[in-house]
Amino acid sequence: MDLSSVADQLQTSTAVGSADMAASARRAPSSSDPLWWRSAAIYQIYPRSFADANGDGVGDLAGVRRHLGYLKDLGIDAIWFTPWYASPLADGGYDVADYRSIDPRFGTLEEAEGLIQDALALGIRTIIDIVPNHISDQHPWFQAALAAGPGSPERERFWFREGKGRNGDEMPTNWESNFSGETWTRTADANGTPGEWYLHLFTPEQPDLNWNHPDVRRMHEDILKFWFDRGVGGVRIDSAALLVKDDALPEVPNDPGPGGHPTQDRDELHDIYRSWRSIADSYPGTRVLVGEIWLPDIDRFAKYLRKDELHTAFNFDFLARPWDADELRDSIDATLAAHAPVDAPSTWVLSNHDVTRPVTRYGREDSSFAFGKKRAGIPTDLALGARRGRAAALLTAALPGALYIYQGDELGLPEVEDIPEDLLDDPMHFRSGGVDPGRDGCRVPLPWSGSTPPFGFSPDSASAAPWLPQPASWASITVQAQQADPSSMLWLYRQALRIRRALNATSDTSFAWRELAPHVLAFDRGPDFLSVTNLSIHSIDLPDNGGILLCSSPLDGGKLPPDSTAWLRTQHEPPEIRA
Ligand code: GLC
């Protein structure tokens, strides 16, 4: 499929409606390419909030299976599921009690297997989340460690230590938690007296595993095989740069230097991922390893992507940057430059289940993102944010590499900032003493249809309300409402993903900036595609082109208005005519 035929199809589908658009998306190729992951569009599902089939107010796998057609029509190549395993949900499922079973609120293992196969039949691969840094405190290993007491082999799978100070009542280190607050919790011995402390970089319900222990390594290798055997196309590795700790437990130095931090980015990690890679490579097809790696040092970041380690890792630098041409250009340049030497594709991520939704973020005066900076009540202009969110969607979709789309971003959902305190769930909020609003605002159940909550998220006969309340104003942005509106965010995403697929089929990594005007990001991809994003405050003339493929906002007298992206063909004649 070349760009001109996509453009023709788009014109047809715009005229005749979404049924044709869907039919045409179904024709798109996707499934047999071993390099699928290099340019894949990957849709992130937060199962709790995607769709609730059984009416208990919590999303489930049966709900996902019902909506696979929606995802196919959207034009994605793979789904990444945040954890779906048995879990007390102390941290939204990132506290896994059993990696080999599905939480009963979400369904059964059999349903997960069915879902993986149903999705594959539509050409959609499944990526699951592996959480190797920590485990639930309810996992049998941790329960056994507590029961077995100090000095036992059961405790060696974790980080149990005597406290400091006269009665051992000071923590072994003063490391700070990624969720603010302390990283050690004191246990009680069998007779009730205060005993050893255990390490948890996140909540006390998520004790850290000791990766020097062979059981820990073996268990994770078995988990990988368990899921690869069930047909998953890859794993997203949670907190991938945190697993290994300096077992001398030093305090964090002022300037740790490369590999010198006691809990982050330690050199020993690379061996772990080499062994995971050899497991992935022993399976037919390409099973990908995707790291969640938040590291300011982009060259250290790229080391994880050497060819015998991870396939890709999330590029969070881009989403942390404000809506500013120099900042975004700098991020794109740094990202492409760091990935080139290891020949790994970049990933482009506008949001996920941990960060403020783009529509809200880009409407703020300071549109950058950083953990620890989130506060309730920061004003935002949602109309401006939505406009920029549309422009950003096209900008990122045009860049070479893989693209991640967090559920609901294709609907332009804003962050929900007025969830009543007693309904909030995220430990990040509570551990900050209520200072950080937490991440619930980007995890509100999706609106599918109808004019009042639960907006088709749960069936009409549901016995419970959605686990987080949906704003009444979402009536105008349900999937149903947007399907009927060619100017909607949903249509923009569908069209963008179809053009992107054709673009990547013809031009893998080619990319070249074009200087058009100040505060404008324009780049060519291959011989017949140009993306132009206007971050200035003036409308700009578009360069000579062979037709507009897609635009995030209507043109203003032929000009591209501020906060908009246009995709253009650069050749005047379709290639087949020239030939
Ligand atoms: C990752 C997840 C986040 C989770 C944390 C601890 O950052 O994305 O949601 O809370 O790890 O597992």
Image (cartoon, helix red, strand yellow):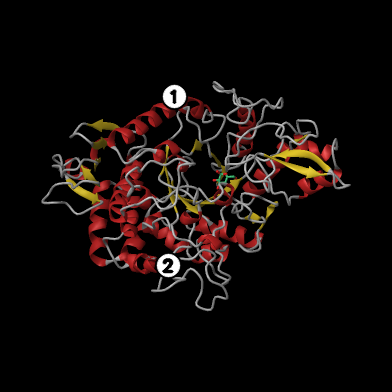
Q: Is residue 471 left or right of residue 80?
A: left
Rendered location of residue 476, percent (x, y): 34, 67
Rendered location of residue 327, percent (x, y): 33, 34
Q: Amino acid at mark 2?
A: Trp
For label 1, the SS is helix
Using the rendered view, name the quadrant where residue 505 is placed. top left
The one nearer the camera, 566 or 114, is 566
Rendered location of residue 407, percent (x, y): 45, 55
Residue extending furthest right?
A: 191
Residue 457 in sight:
yes
Q: Residue at position x 38%, y 28% from top? A: 334
Rendered location of residue 461, percent (x, y): 53, 79
Ligand 1 closer than 8 Å to label 1 CB = no
Quarter of the rendered image showing ligand 1 = top right
Reading the image, the residue beneath label 2 is: 448
Using the rendered view, name the quadrant where residue 151 is placed. top right
The quadrant the C terminus occupies is top left
The one nearer the camera, 344 or 81, is 81
Q: Is residue 158 left or right of residue 117?
A: right
| The label number, if any, that marks residue 341 in the structure image | 1
* Disc 1 packing (10 Å; few <14; some 14–19; many ≥20): few
Residue extending furthest bottom?
A: 461
Q: Are marks 1 and 2 in contact (CB under 8 Å)?
A: no
375 is higher (above) or lower (below) than 217 = below
Q: Amino acid at mark 1?
A: Pro
Residue 82 in sight:
no
Q: Residue at position x 56%, y 65% from top? A: 58
Q: Residue at position x 63%, y 64% from top? A: 105
| The label number, if any, that marks residue 138 in the structure image | none
